[in-house]
Amino acid sequence: MSHPASGENFSSDLPRECAHVVIGGGLFGCSIAYHLARKNKEVIVLERRNICSGASGRNGGQVIQLEGRDRNEESIKRRLALTGENNRMLQGLSRELDVELEYHRTGSLDIALTEGERQELEEIVRIQKKAGDREVEFLGREETLRLCPVLTTEIKGARYRASDGTINPFLYTHGFAKNVVRLGGAVFPHTEVKKILKKKGKVQGVETSSGKKIRAGKVINATNAWSSLLVPEIDILPLRQIAAVTEPASALPICPVEAFLDGEAVYTNIQPGSGNLVAGGLRALAMSRQGQYDETVYQPEVTGAARVFSCLYPGLGDLSIIRAWAGTMALGPDFLPVIGKVPEIEGLYLSAGFYNGMAYACIIGELVSEMVITDKVPAPLVAFGPEKYYRKNFRWPTEYNCTSLSEFFART
């Protein structure tokens, strides 16, 4: 299988019109465009920076089907209906795209560091099983350490799902983009959409920052954390996260880990073929909404990332962090994605609010393409429709990070 080159044969001349315009060259935009092209539909992707330059390329690569300590049975059912099918699709995706995706089913752990957390996780496992999660289980301390012996021996146990894993997000996204082009579509990086054109309640196309107008009957806004800038009627919340990478290490028996450390939610980590340890979803400073788009990494955040490695993996404390970066994820008003037809505007679709995109992209690309083509909402997407959030005002915290948002949603 081939790896997608960093400079795919993307197009340079914008068309005057196209049946389907996808805004956003991240994982979801490229997946939606790929599934449209696969169904022989005319489609282009417009991206303001490079392909995979936003959240899709600024995460830890974890494929976690039920992230977070979710106790809401309805929310659990909604998530698993999508992520379970996505996991099935991922198994054959490398072959389908002819791209090595570095996808591995390593399992994932949500670890308890205190006795209170152990009791909490045991209760969460019971709730999630009741909601239909047939796979999740609670492991005791010894079972967890046999699975991941480099973890701190201070752990009390963990929630575990065997079919979770890791993937290379760059190969994942570029694999879709490469195949959009192969199937006759076009991808335009460095092409910012400034406005979605509408007339009498119907989409007319888009206008770029250069003033170029492209006529289109259907437009899909897949810009995730930036989606409300183009569709302000639906409030999608940006959420800044930190990732870091260490120097290379020998192959280790590790898998994605979720934990609360010093009261902060952290997610870690994967080890790609290079041997470096990559951790995404580390502790980020609380910032204003506008500050959530800040891609600067601050010293306290790097120090916090180092502490995550040294506390959770004490035997790896001598590894140096060689790079850290920030990226902006997104959340819908219910901590769930918002996917579907935008009310009152025929031909406009939204796919946004994904905090953990790796676990959703395949199935969302398939379902959104089906919805766009048939103009009917597939059953799995009905619960995520934008209509219940349309023109609603939400009182978000003035400053927030992942941990404070988790507490905010728990109270509401």
Image: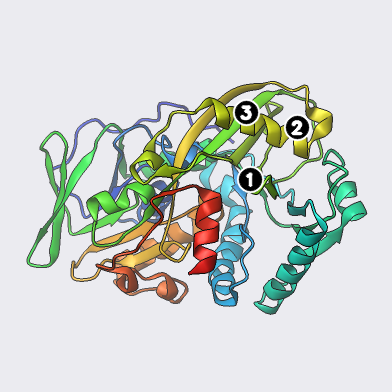
Helix, strand or loop at label 3? It is helix
Residue 127 position (above or below residue 241): below
Any part of residue 291 in sight = yes
Measuring from the top left, give residue 173's x and y in whole percent.
47, 41
Measuring from the top left, give residue 347's x and y in whole percent.
21, 64
Helix, strand or loop at label 2? It is helix
Helix, strand or loop at label 1? It is strand
Amino acid type shown at disc 3: Thr
| Viewer-nearest residue: 392 or 212 | 392
Measuring from the top left, give residue 86's x and y in whole percent.
56, 60
Q: Quadrant of the N terminus?
A: top right
Whether residue 412 sits left or right of residue 146 in the image: it is: left
Task: Name the residue carrying label 2.
Answer: 310
Task: Name the residue carrying label 1.
Answer: 266
Report how far apart the C-alphas of labels 3 and 2 lie in the structure: 11 Å
Whether residue 29 sits left or right of residue 284 in the image: it is: left
| Viewer-nearest residue: 205 or 280 | 280
Mark linked to residue 303:
3
Any part of residue 271 in sight = no
Which residue: 57% across, 62% down?
83
Chain-order first, disc 3 or disc 1 = 1
Which residue: 78% across, 61% down?
116
Residue 343 position (above or below residue 105): below
Whether residue 169 sits left or right of residue 303 in the image: it is: left
Amino acid type shown at disc 2: Ser
Chain-order first, disc 1 or disc 2 = 1
Measuring from the top left, give residue 371's x and y in whole percent.
35, 68
Report the label total. 3
Whether residue 91 sits left or right of residue 188 in the image: it is: right
Q: How is the image coloured?
A: rainbow
| Viewer-nearest residue: 86 or 5 | 86
Report how far apart the C-alphas of labels 1 and 2 lie in the structure: 13 Å
